[in-house]
């Protein structure tokens, strides 16, 4: 369902709510109250039903938004945010033209944790996501530090983190209207981590690095 469900009474008493309602207004209010009660009962029924199938209500809403999205059988993050009425929450990203301007660090969703990893998506999904978010968080910290000491005062590891944060926002978050597959998105994450030496990728096991990292086996995901 798109937008918000609203129920506007057919006729409001122009004298205001503080006075005795007319019979027509009272009927409208009764209908509105009955509608809201029915909606609450439906929502409770729906929540119980999806939990019996091992889903949270939020996961079901996201699944419904993806499966029912008009046109292709997938949607961009920005399209889903609009469909689920999730407001972009980074003024800085919005100002710099990053679309969708969603701040991923406070927006990390429990929806992801229950549905990723080996047997669901790709074996590297969870660990790679953890590494990307950790590296991005460090890059944002360095960005604040740079405003004090300047980029020339940063050690090489911090410069890598700063460059990564810029590239992560520009290429990974800045999806715009591009439709990337999950594999393409994960491969992009590995590519953005290329400047880091293995010993700085503490969220990734040596086995995952050997299997997926460009240069370790010749190509990502090979």
Image (cartoon, grey):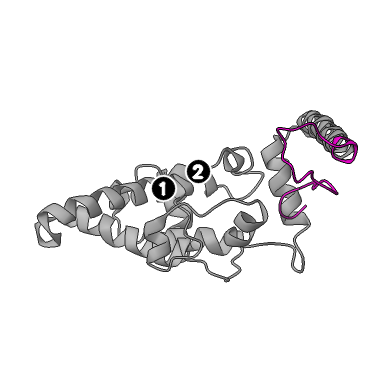
Q: Which residue is mark 2?
A: 108
Q: Secondary structure at mark 1?
A: helix
Comparing 136 with 33, the one in front is 33
Contact, mark 2 vs mark 1 (Cβ under 8 Å):
yes
Badge 2: residue crowd in 10 Å (few <14, some 14–19, many ≥20): few
Task: Find out whether residue 114 is within the magenta segment.
Answer: no
Q: Residue at x 46, y 49 (%)?
A: 104
Comparing 25 with 101, the one in front is 25
Q: Is residue 24 left or right of residue 81?
A: right
Comparing 124 with 49, the one in front is 49
Q: Residue at x 78, y 52 (%)?
A: 1
The quarter of the displayed image where residue 117 is located: top right
Badge 1: residue crowd in 10 Å (few <14, some 14–19, many ≥20): some
The correct choice, above or below, for 207 with respect to 29 in the image is below
Q: Residue at x 34, y 50 (%)?
A: 135
Q: Which residues are magenta?
A: 1-26
The quarter of the displayed image where residue 95 is located: bottom left
The correct choice, above or below, for 191 with respect to 135 in the image is below
How far apart are the two marked residues, 2 and 1, measured between alpha carbons? 9 Å
Q: Which residue is mark 1?
A: 133
Task: Find out whether residue 10 is within the magenta segment.
Answer: yes
Is the stretch drawn in magenta largely helix, strand or loop? Answer: loop
Q: Earlier in the sequence, mark 2 or mark 1?
A: 2
Name the mark nearer the viewer: 2 or 1: 2
How far across and down, in percent of the image, does residue 58 sit?
67, 40
């Amino acid at each position: 369902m798109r937008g918000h469900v609203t129920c506007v009474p057919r006729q409001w008493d122009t004298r205001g709510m503080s006075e005795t309602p007319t019979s027509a207004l009272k009927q409208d209010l009764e209908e509105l109250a009955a509608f809201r009660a029915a909606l609450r009962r439906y929502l409770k029924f729906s929540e119980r039903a999806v939990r019996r199938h091992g889903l949270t209500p939020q996961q079901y809403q996201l699944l419904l938004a993806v499966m029912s999205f008009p046109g292709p059988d997938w949607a961009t993050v920005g399209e889903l945010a609009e469909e689920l009425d999730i407001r972009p929450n980074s003024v800085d990203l919005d100002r710099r033209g990053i679309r969708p301007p969603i701040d991923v660090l406070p927006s990390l969703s429990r929806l992801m944790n229950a549905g990723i990893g080996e047997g669901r998506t790709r074996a590297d999904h969870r660990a790679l996501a953890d590494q990307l978010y950790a590296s991005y968080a460090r890059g944002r910290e360095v960005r604040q530090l740079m405003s004090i000491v300047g980029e020339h005062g940063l050690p090489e590891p911090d410069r890598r983190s700063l460059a990564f944060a810029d590239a992560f926002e520009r290429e990974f978050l800045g999806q715009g209207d591009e439709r990337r597959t999950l594999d393409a998105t994960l491969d992009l994450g590995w590519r953005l981590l290329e400047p880091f030496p293995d010993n700085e990728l503490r969220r990734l096991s040596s086995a995952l690095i050997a299997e997926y990292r460009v240069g370790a086996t010749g190509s990502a995901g090979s």
